[in-house]
Image (cartoon, rainbow, N blue to C red):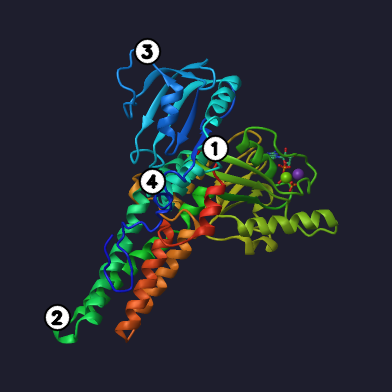
Amino acid sequence: MHCLCRHGLTCVRARPYSTISALSTAQRKTIYALSTPPGKAGVGVIRVSGPAALAVWSRLIKAKNRKQDFPVPWKFERCHIVHPEDGRVIDDALSVFFKAPKSFTSEDVLELHVHSGRAIIASVFSALATFPSCRPAEAGEFTRRAFLGGRLDLTEVEGLRDLIDAETEGQRRLALRAASGSVRNQYEQIRSDIIHCLALVEALIDFSEEDVEDGVYDQARGQARRLLANIEALLDDGHRGEIIRSGIKLAIFGPPNAGKSTLLNFLAKREAAIVTSVPGTTRDILELSLDIDGLPVIVADTAGLRKSEDLVESIGIERARAAVQQADISLCVLSLESAAAGLPQDMQDLVSADTYFLFNKNDLAVDTQQHTSKPNSWTVSLATGDGTETFMTGLSAALQKRFQFKGDDDNAPIITHARHRSHLTSAAQFLRAFIEAEDVIFGAEELRYAAKEIGKISGEIGVEDVLDSIFRNFCIGK
Ligand SMILES: Nc1nc2c(ncn2[C@@H]2O[C@H](COP(=O)(O)OP(=O)(O)OP(=O)(O)O)[C@@H](O)[C@H]2O)c(=O)[nH]1
Ligand SMILES: [K+]
Ligand SMILES: [Mg+2]
């Protein structure tokens, strides 16, 4: 750890979060948990992490023809797991020992690959419970130790959680970039660029003007401007990363009986919503999750929009309008029979650049020509299936284009959490303040704040409450 300035701003790779090493080995408990889902399966993995992992190995893991009495690290061994109380064999298993610091948690880790069965797992747990220094792990505790041990930064931790939660290809790709450290590297680069800038300014403060070359402050400002432009470009991503992570919200809207619920059922490939010829059939919002060519889409069917005296229907209509306003994308469904009259007045304020049109009931209409040429629109008959293939291809292409998610990963957004956006936005504000600062001392202070904001993204700067909320969302055994 080296210091670039008098104020204690540490280098990019420095890890103030050294809680693990701060606790003495004797104080630190060894934790264990089942890391695979509970239940009957071919294999279940029990992880043991902490200073007692080696002792557990010595007392629980027996193998024939073994020459040495320590595990060969990072190598699977066929073994018997025995209960330390009576020596009974619990299971014929595989074990692998990861020697600190080259393990997931950065501590000694023992993994037991047993047959996944209730009695086997209970018996291994009872064997582990005989060690006073061992206790069951809490949710997310392995990952928390990995973070505290400097193995992972917060973007990697979040990436790992998102990777486990990923349900579509798009989410998986985005999460993997974060989990594998490429997002971390980008933020570290930004932070080290800010610190480089700060070093130039510090030189001006620490040495008298004569000792420093002319133009150093301008040089620092020039760098800060370039850095600011980079950060602004990252922020100007249409929130694609956050939207893909949480699911693209697509709201279906339009007048009653246009075929909105029919469309939802078509997309879902099942009778999810009630369809009748009665206008005003749908009242509550009905949502379902779809995977459209790798992109996660949360589709909402809504009440048909019209003036209504009916109290229940009016509430439904209000909810429908709110759903469209909050959606990332909307799909306005119109029946071709009435589409010639144009979009009803009360729907015009719901149309945005992210609104697409579906002209339905092609089978009933005489003149479809005037609509087919409209941009961002498709003409179909959901009843006969006519045009639906083109619609699906078009919708998928529109989503891929809007979220720029085909092609190389370099184009993928790096901001996947609102937390990152808020720190990055603050960092940009501090950089702007530095660029405008008249005074070198104040300017340096702004740069220090900017670096700190980036440090909060990776978790290098104290964020205890953030940590709790992040790790709480993990399952036990992760
Ligand atoms: N002829 C024809 N009828 C259709 C087509 N699509 C849907 N319908 C019929 O139109 C009627 C209304 O369909 P819904 O899906 O309930 O319409 P909606 O827009 O959800 O209506 P509300 O929920 O009442 O706002 C039903 O009788 C459907 O069977 C189509 O392409 N052609
Ligand atoms: K209807
Ligand atoms: Mg409906």
Vertical arrangement, residue 111 with respect to residue 14, above or below: above
> As drawn, is 115 to the left or to the right of 275?
left
Q: Do we see residue 236 in this rendering?
A: no
Inspect the image, locate mark 4, and give the three-letter code of the amino acid beneath it. Arg
Secondary structure found at label 1: strand
| Residue 180 location, quadrant | top left
Q: Nearer the viewer, mark 2 or mark 1?
A: 1
For marks 3 and 4, the one nearer the N-term is 3
From the image, tell me which residue sits under label 4: 177
State whether label 1 is within 8 Å of ligand 3. Answer: no
From the image, tell me which residue sits under label 1: 135
Tag 1: Cα neighbours inside 10 Å, few (<14), some, or many (≥20)?
some
Secondary structure found at label 2: loop
Inspect the image, locate mark 1, and give the three-letter code of the amino acid beneath it. Arg
Q: CA distance from mark 3 to mark 1?
A: 29 Å
For marks 3 and 1, the one nearer the N-term is 3
Tag 4: Cα neighbours inside 10 Å, few (<14), some, or many (≥20)?
many
Inspect the image, locate mark 2, and give the three-letter code of the amino acid beneath it. Glu
From the image, tell me which residue sits under label 3: 64
Q: CA distance from mark 4 to mark 2?
A: 41 Å
For marks 3 and 2, the one nearer the N-term is 3
Q: Nearer the viewer, mark 3 or mark 2?
A: 3
For marks 1 and 4, the one nearer the N-term is 1
Q: Nearer the viewer, mark 3 or mark 4?
A: 3
Q: Residue at x 56, y 51 (%)?
A: 370
Secondary structure found at label 4: helix
Q: Which mark is residue 106?
A: none
